Image (cartoon, helix red, strand yellow):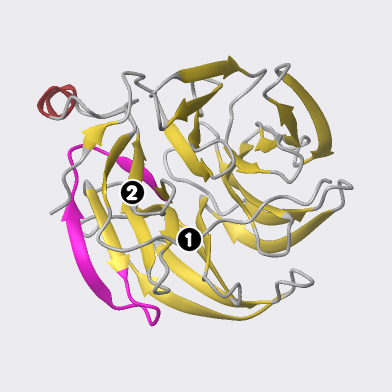
Amino acid sequence: MLDFKPLNDIRCELGEGPVYDDRRNALWYCDILGRSIHCCELAGGDTRSWTLPSEVGSLGLADSGKLVVALRDEVGMFDPEDGTFERIASIEADLPDTRLNDGKVGPDGAFWVGTMDDGDVPVRRPIGALYRIDAAGYVERKVEGLHVSNGLAFSPDGATMFHADSRGPWVDCWDFDPDTGAIANRRRFVDLDDTIGRPDGGATDAEGCYWSAGISAGKLNRFSPDGRLLVSYDVPVVAPTMPCFGGEGLDRLFLTSLRTGRDPAKLEALPLTGTVIVADSPVVGSPVSRFRDA
């Protein structure tokens, strides 16, 4: 069992994208529907917040100290010192039914981010894709035919990329070249369902295991490097969205969650839903990479 406690008193509509900043000893995360970015200093608990022009799908740390941020249809650099956002790439701006969603900085120093079907339709369509964007704004489409691109994470040695489709629902993995960002040898990592939890955000630990937020089941699932379910934790939020390892020893586990559209009775029973929750981790996390913009 994981003993989760609230990180702070901020309640997101759709909390996502947590990433630990070792330079600041702080946790960054976003509220997609709230169009906001939050930064909580772990030592004192002080939290700063910024509002952005559109939905904030995901974010990553950059060498410069800025953040690389995915808004609805653009990727750019956010400077927390002055609150400015500078676009470096436009993604699917001509497709009004999609928006950028889950993203992570890869071991190659590029930002990997996917799109999802965000149209007013009863069933998600496979119209999303996964992209790689470098600091010069060069965009490569890497994977197509996705309903809801999600679950990006990389193995500790940088040789494997994990990626999920929340409406697949599955997690796949690829061989990953950390020098070039080339991916190859796509294979199924695990098939999932509503009971164990459709895969939302993901993270890896130092043992090479993959952690998946089971958004439909209120669970946090840990899989072995070969895709076996090792443990499934019940969590005190209705719809967990992404795990993240942090703290100076990467020995704390943070988890974001979704409130919008959830059953009011369940929200009343699990009032921490929407806050970032944190627990001591049974394993140490894998460090994240920084966007090479400097």
- Residue 243: say if magenta: yes
Q: Is residue 143 left or right of residue 293?
A: left
- Residue 16: say if magenta: no
**Foreground: 24 or 70?**
24
User: Which residue matches tag 2?
Assistant: 252
What amino acid is labelled 1 in the image? Ala
Secondary structure at numbered mark 2: strand
- Above or below, 40 against 290 in this view is above
Secondary structure at numbered mark 1: strand
Other-residue count near label 2 (Cα within 10 Å), few / some / many at <14 / 14–19 / ≥20: some
Q: Are circles 2 and 1 on residues that touch, CB within 8 Å?
A: no
What amino acid is labelled 2 in the image? Arg
- On residue 164, which mark appears? 1
Find the magenta span and give its range.
Answer: 223-244
- Above or below, 63 against 184 in this view is above
Residue 243 in percent (x, y) is at 38, 49
Quadrant location of residue 46? top left
Q: Is residue 238 left or right of residue 184?
A: left
- On residue 16, which mark appears? none
Is tag 2's residue or tag 1's residue first in the polypeptide sequence?
Answer: 1
Q: Is residue 186 left or right of residue 17?
A: right
Nearer to us of marks 2 and 1 is 2
Q: Residue at x 54, y 45 (%)?
A: 22
Residue 221 in percent (x, y) is at 27, 60
Q: Quadrant of the N terminus?
A: bottom left
Other-residue count near label 1 (Cα within 10 Å), few / some / many at <14 / 14–19 / ≥20: many
Q: Is residue 96 visible?
A: yes
Quadrant location of residue 82? top right
